[in-house]
Amino acid sequence: MNIKLPIVGSFLFGYSMKRSTILTLLVISLVLALFVTPLGYHGKVWLNQLFSGTPGVIQTSKRDKLADYDWKLKDAEWDFFSFEKSRGNVVFINFWASWRLPCAAELKGIQKLYDTYEDKIDFYIITNEERPPVEEFMEEKDFTFPVTYLIIGERSPIEVLEPPASYIIDRDGYIVVKEDDIKDWDNTTVHKLLDELINKGI
């Protein structure tokens, strides 16, 4: 009995060490997966989506109104156009960058929103990047919403926010939503708000 105790103790100690080593290796593998592999990229996108909240609606009495629609932009073909064409329409604006992971997470919901409302509201999905990286990003992610290019230094009727950031503007030019962080744009709350804004004044 005295001879076997050290053997059993050694076995248990070895088992404990092996279990600890396995757990350590699993943690290291998970960390590497999150920061090095493509799986990690998709995992971080998913986490951003998971923790993105519903956008808040500004109280009617506290809403700012656009002074004008004087804003020169470029479309997906790099042609100039004026924001003036959206006067009297409900407008959704999002500032984004292809290299920012929170933007990639947010744009998945925006694509779904666009699929639902593309013929009912004006979408301005705005970036200040050059065309090649944007077109590559759009093709890679299978996004089909219209891309708008910001002209650096051009005056705008709204504050140009750091991406990801978004606005919803009603038919009368009032800012109904202003968000300067990633949000979930494809949910019943947003749909209900947009339906109300679309039907207002019709």
Image (tube, rainbow, N blue to C red):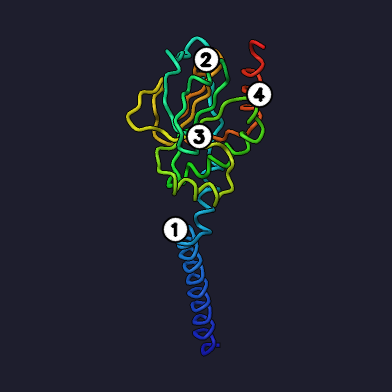
Query: Hey, what amino acid is under mark 4?
Result: Lys
Q: Earlier in the sequence, mark 2 or mark 1?
A: 1
Determine contact: label 1, label 4, CB under 8 Å: no
Q: CA distance from mark 2 to mark 1?
A: 41 Å
Element under label 3?
A: strand
Query: Which of the two labelled residues, at mark 4 and mark 3, occupies the earlier sequence position?
Result: 3
Residue depth check, mark 2 versus mark 3: number of the one nearer the observer = 3
Quarter holding the N terminus is: bottom right
Residue 89 vs 118, above or below: the answer is above
Q: Which mark is residue 59?
A: 2
Residue linked to disc 3: 125
Label 1 CA crowd tier, 10 Å (few <14, some 14–19, many 20+):
few
Amino acid at dot 3: Ile
Q: Is residue 123 visible to us here? A: yes
Query: Residue at label 1?
Result: 35
Q: Find residue 158 and report its horizontal and vertical position in percent.
A: 41, 22
Residue extending furthest left? Answer: 153
Calculate the distance from the C-alpha at mark 1 to the C-alpha at mark 4.
Answer: 38 Å
Residue 192 badge: 4
Q: Earlier in the sequence, mark 1 or mark 4?
A: 1
Nearest to the observer: residue 153 or residue 167: 153
